[in-house]
Image (tube, rainbow, N blue to C red):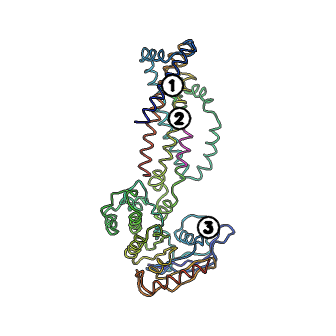
Amino acid sequence: MQSLLFEGSAWINETQIFPKISFTMQAGSWTCMLGPSGVGKTTILRLIAGLPSEIVLDGSIVLKGGGRPCGQISLMSQTDNLLPWLSATENVVLGNRLRGEKPNYDKANELIGKVGLTDHRKKKPYALSGGQRQRVALARTLMEERPIVLLDEPFSALDARVRAEMQELAAQHLEGKTILLVTHDPAEAARLGESILVLSMNGIKDVCPPAGGIIRAYDEQTVLACQGQLLRLLREEI
Amino acid sequence: MKSSLRLILITVALFLFWHFLVKFAELPKFILPSPLLVMQTFISSFSLILKHAVVTGTEILLGLLAGTVLGSFTAICLAISPVARTIVRPMMVLSQALPVFALAPILTLWLGYGLWPKILMALLIIYFPVTSAFFDGLMNTPKGMLDLSRVMNGTPWRIMFNLRIPAAVPGLASGLRLAAVYAPIGAIIGEWVGASEGLGYLMLLANGRAKIDLMFAALLVLVFMTLILHWSIDRLGNSLTARMSP
């Protein structure tokens, strides 16, 4: 398990997206990144994931022990990106198929059980609710067994109850992984962040997370205080 | 049920209009035969028409099949290779500037009077719509799914077969719907230029001998075949599209 260091500024041609910033995703812990829309949160995520884009990083993304994060990452985003023509189980083994490996159905079904969808594993995405689809997406993410997990607002389209459930489920099953969660929601960052970053046009700010391990109760005083502090910071930054 | 009833009503109305037009305008039967005469001819020449319809049907189906296979193959190659796109796409657009009809005599010259030039004509006429529609579909795979498959370290060909092709099925289906109405045009043009059998040949022959009733009977059979083909492909396309994006 390795920490990931991000350092640099991002550019499209001559236009700067964000100035030189640096942060560390600590090994085996949750790093939450907050910031207003359009500030480049998703850009950072895409750069770490090594996805093609017009944005160029003037800097480096390295693992602490040396080497590049390529091939050690899995990704989960706001849209579940489940293939509509495949059942839940087939969606979970997609990575196997795309790499030409034999699909490991036993493991897939075990993971589907872990996210509480055993009875729904043969259903196609259209027959599942938004929350259930994100559970399948979580199982698919776990199936990849990658040490680094990038979460791009994965819970933001869900209603409050389901969102809280999904946060708990993710905290439980992603334990031990090095995680970057990009979110709009100060409450989510206060619940899940073991390190909290606020990204703005001017750079990045490290905010002290509430005491105690995750996942924190949403109604704890320190969590609510942190949530308030983050919201204030976000409003000042714009 | 409702729509098929409407279709029948419209058809009956058209035939009635035709019938009374001939009757009241007192058109001679070598200009426009009445629908009843066409029907009589259809029944009396049924085996003749059937024989030629089988030939034309074979040409259309084989042309459609070959055009679909070739068009799909081209679309996949173009979608997977940027180099192929830069080289082949301008050529494809250029080839569309060339009227396919103008090629018919040359194809007959090269391939003779048999089935092949007609199949090739049908193929040529549907190749571009099929390729183009399927290619557009292949290039419009939802971005999030593509990102995901790249992060999963999928190989380009596996991403193509597991993700991009299934996601492009609706595009292919709309190309095939066009192909179903274009392919018969190709086959008939091919027959007009040079053939010894087929509905196009029969129509020319009947026309030359002033057997306009026979010509109309052959024409109606052709229309019927095209409609059936379009209907079947439309059904197939709809059910595939529903499976891929319910």
Question: Residue B110: horizontal and vertical position, in percent?
Answer: 57, 27
Disc 1 crowd rating (10 Å Cα; few below 14, some 14-19, many 20+) is few
The verdict on residue B133 being magenta is yes
Rounded to the nearest angstrom, the CA distance separating label 1 from label 2 is: 33 Å
- Against A89, residue A46 (above or below) is below
Q: Which chain carries label 2?
A: B
- Tag 2 secondary structure: helix
Between B53 and B37, the one nearer to me in the picture: B37
Query: Would you identify the image quadrant in which residue B50 lies?
Result: top left
Between A124 and A62, the one nearer to me in the picture: A124
The residue to which callout 2 is attached is B123
Left/right of residue B97 with respect to residue A182 in the rendered view: right
The residue to which callout 1 is attached is B14
Rounded to the nearest angstrom, the CA distance separating label 3 from label 1 is: 62 Å
The residue to which callout 3 is attached is A55
Residue B136 visible in rendering: yes
Q: Are marks 3 and 2 on the same chain?
A: no
Question: What type of secondary structure mainly makes up the magenta span?
Answer: helix
Q: Please provide the residue range marked out in magenta.
A: B126-136
Q: Quadrant of the N terminus of chain B?
A: top left
- Tag 1 secondary structure: helix
